[in-house]
Each structure stands twice: as structure tokens, then as C-alpha cells.
Amino acid sequence: MLSRIAESLFWIGRYVERADGTARILDVHLERLNQLTAEERATVSDNLMAVMGADPEEDRDEGDGLREVLHRLAFDRGRTSSIAGSLGAARENARRARETVSSSVWEALNTTWNGLSGHRQDVVGTYRLCTWVVERTATVRGMADSTMSRDDSWQFLSLGRCLERADMTARMLATGDEQSFRLSWANMLRCAGAYESFLRSRPAGFDESSAAEFLLLDGLFPRSIVSSLRGAEKSLISLDPVPSRLGHMDASLRIIGQARSFLEFHHTEDLLGELPEHLDRVRSACAEASDAITSKYFSHDVAQAWTGELI
């Protein structure tokens, strides 16, 4: 497979998952932002944008920060850290790999991109956008899974999806780090679409630690960080199945495997106290693995950055 096609497929997976994750995070925080005072709203808005990789000081307008949040995280088509920017970048990469992705995937992405202009750029419009984007990205993923052969094309797309999902779940959990910015863990679980699955796994009462443990470590829930890292490992092994008598010598596989193993085998009595450290480790591992994947499979030396990418 040509490296440019492989790279496009990898970034389709990442951008679609990024749009989905950003929509989930923004949706669950909008209600909280509306209930705060103007001063508190500005603080929470800055924290949210920082967690999502946007500089809260850049192009700041006078006000409580809500306008910047809506524009920078939802509607700014020039930044791939936003919902609209991610979907536009996914569509552009699908156009470049048009001979490889299925017609169903292309049509789903194209329809999603064209539908963005129908959403109002206010709080109510953003609520509706977030719900719509979660549904549309699920359609794109479903079309990919049901219409693409499980060859290298699908593996690169799945690799990007899993890597981005681990990163986005870590970012979502990071929005609860500061007391001034804390969500209830019930809302955090709903943000990940994990609330019902979590309740079925915990028939008795639960606390914050058990909810964090589920989103970090549950091996059966597909949006947990461990499950996402396992999926990335499987794709990397499928792409390069050559065994090594000296262990895993592939840099990206080693980085992801080390991050997953640390989470799975690290027992702690104070998970919430160590949560920021765990999340930083996961996000660093995702960035380093992306660099290693780019160096091995794609045609340039440095991976595309999480923010500041141009469509």
C-alpha cells in the first residue's frame, strides 16, 4: 500500500474519533457552563479548552469564555481540534484515499460534512450539533466496519481510531482533575456512553474510584483506555506480524504495550490520587506512538500534531 494512502486512512480513523470524542465532552459540559456565574464560567471554559489542546489565551474575546468554547471546540473549520475541523479533515483524507475507502464510507463522511452548515452557532445549536455528530460518526464507523475488508486498509483506519479513542478518553477524564472543574462521575460515565455498562458491572453501590477504574481498565467496554490500547496493539501486530525472538522491537508497539501493561498491572489503593499521572502517561504514549507509526509507515519524519493541523 502507498504510504500516502495508509496515512490518509490512519488520519480518517483519528479525525472521526476526535469529532466524536469532542462532541461527547462538549455536550456534557455545556449544561454545567450554563449553570455557572460569569467568573466561574470563564475559569471552566479556559480549563476545558486547555484539556482539549486549545490555547485559551489565543484570540480571546471579552466575555465569560462560552463564545470561545463554542467556536474553538465546535465550529472552527480551520482547526482540527474542533468538531467541524476534524470532520473536514476526515473528509479530505477520504477524498485522497477515494480508491481505497468504500463508497459507503465516503458518502457518510461527505453527507456529514455537508450537514454541518445546518447547525446554528449558539448554545442550543451546539447541543443539537453534539448529538448529531455522535450519531453521524457512529454511522461512519459502522459503514467502515461493515463494508471494508479486514486488510491493511482497515487496519490503518482502526489503528488511528483506537489511538485517538485512548487519547480522547484520557482527555475526558482529565476534565475532572480540578475541584473547580469537577463533574459528577455519573455525568463522566454518560459522557463516555458507559453509564449503563458500568451499572451492569457493579450491581452494588459505587464510588468515584470504581467509575474511574472502569473507564481506565475495563477490558470489555470498548471506550475504556485499556480496551483502546489493546485494539491499537492488535492492528499493529496485523500490519507487521513478523515475530521476534528478542521481544517486540517495533517502537510503536512497544510504547503502546508498555502503557497498557502499566495500567493493567499497576495496583493502587489511591487511583483518584494517581489519576493525573496515569492520564499524562497515556496521552504521552499516544503522541509518541503516533510519531513512531509515522516514522515507520509514512513518508515524512514528524507526525501531524494534535492541534494546529491544517486541512
Image (spheres, rainbow, N blue to C red):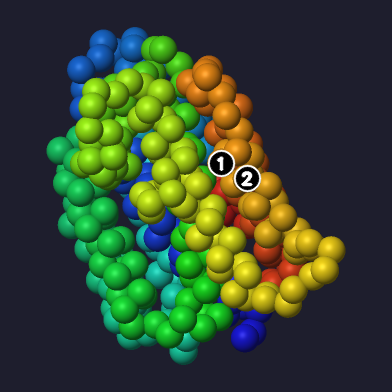
| In the rendered image, the vertical position of residue 80 relative to residue 47, given as above or below | below
What is the count of numbered marks?
A: 2
**Other-residue count near label 2 (Cα within 10 Å), few / some / many at <14 / 14–19 / ≥20:** few
Amino acid type at mark 2: Ser
Nearer the observer, 272 or 80: 272
Q: Tell me the number on the disc at residue 35.
A: none
Q: Residue beneath label 2, please?
A: 261
Left or right of residue 115: residue 11: right
> Residue 199, image x and y in percent?
23, 36
Residue located 38% across and 18% down the image: 181
Question: In whole angstroms, how far apart are the C-alphas of marks 2 and 1?
Answer: 5 Å
Residue sitting farthest toward the front: 204
> Residue 54, image x and y in percent?
50, 36
> Residue 214, image x and y in percent?
39, 37
Q: Does residue 235 appear in the picture of this structure?
A: yes
| In the rendered image, the vertical position of residue 214 relative to residue 228, given as above or below | above
Q: Does residue 65 appear in the picture of this structure?
A: no
Residue located 50% across and 60% down the image: 231
Nearer the observer, 254 or 301: 254
Residue located 25% across and 14% down the image: 36
Amino acid type at mark 1: Glu
Q: Residue beneath label 1, please?
A: 264
Disc 2 element: helix
**Other-residue count near label 1 (Cα within 10 Å), few / some / many at <14 / 14–19 / ≥20:** some
Nearer the observer, 77 or 260: 260
Left or right of residue 292: residue 67: left
Residue located 56% across and 66% down the image: 234
> Residue 10, image x and y in percent?
54, 68
Callout 2–callout 1 Cβ contact below 8 Å: yes
Nearer the observer, 72 or 226: 226
